[in-house]
Amino acid sequence: MQFGYTIIYVPDVEASLAFFERAFDMTRRFLHESGTYGELETGATTLAFADHSLGHANFAGGHVAANASPQPLGMEIGLVTPDVPTAHQQALGSGATELAPPSTKPWGQTVSYLRCPDGTLVELCTPILAG
């Protein structure tokens, strides 16, 4: 078994791709001509977005829409960067909402938390130093 995808159901796939391109300097890999599914270049594991309509078609009972939830969902996307404060400010300037500013954890890692316009919870963090 290999972890292959994280797919986030969003109200507007194109808007989510564009936000991640602006806020986190990611590159678009693919957007289906229907506009209902798209992927970013993120390494071995694919970060993808799918329209809520696909989620409703896949799950008979529906799903919780992150953008409609007043609180962030209990899962996050972790993006590793050597410069959390700069990345945090870039994301805020692109339309993210701050949940927690950059801070240094007791184990030495710098982290911050943001909420994207589509409701996705993102942790920005420095690499964890092995030791």
Image: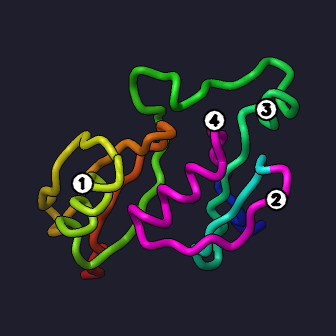
Nearer to me, 32 or 43: 32
Q: Position of residue 60 (x, y in %)?
A: 86, 21
The three-letter amino acid code for the residue at tag 3 is Ser
Q: Residue at x 80, y 27 (%)?
A: 56
Camera-near label (2 vs 1) is: 2
Structural distance between the alpha carbons of marks 3 and 2:
14 Å
Label of residue 53 in the image: 3
Closer to the eye: label 4 or 1: 4
In what element is the residue under mark 3? helix
Mark 2 closeness class: few <14, some 14–19, many ≥20 residues within 10 Å: few
Which numbered marker is on residue 112? 1
Residue behind mark 4: 11
- Alpha-carbon span between mark 3 and mark 1: 31 Å
Point out the stretch of residues depicted in magenta.
Answer: 8-34
58 above or below 20?
A: above
Q: Which residue is drawn at 48% across and 43% down?
A: 120
Rate crowding at label 1 as few (under 14), some (14 to 19) or many (20 or more) other CA atoms within 10 Å: many
Q: Which of marks 3 and 1 is nearer the N terminus?
A: 3
Tell me which corner region of the image, top left, top right, bottom left or bottom right, holds residue 106: bottom left
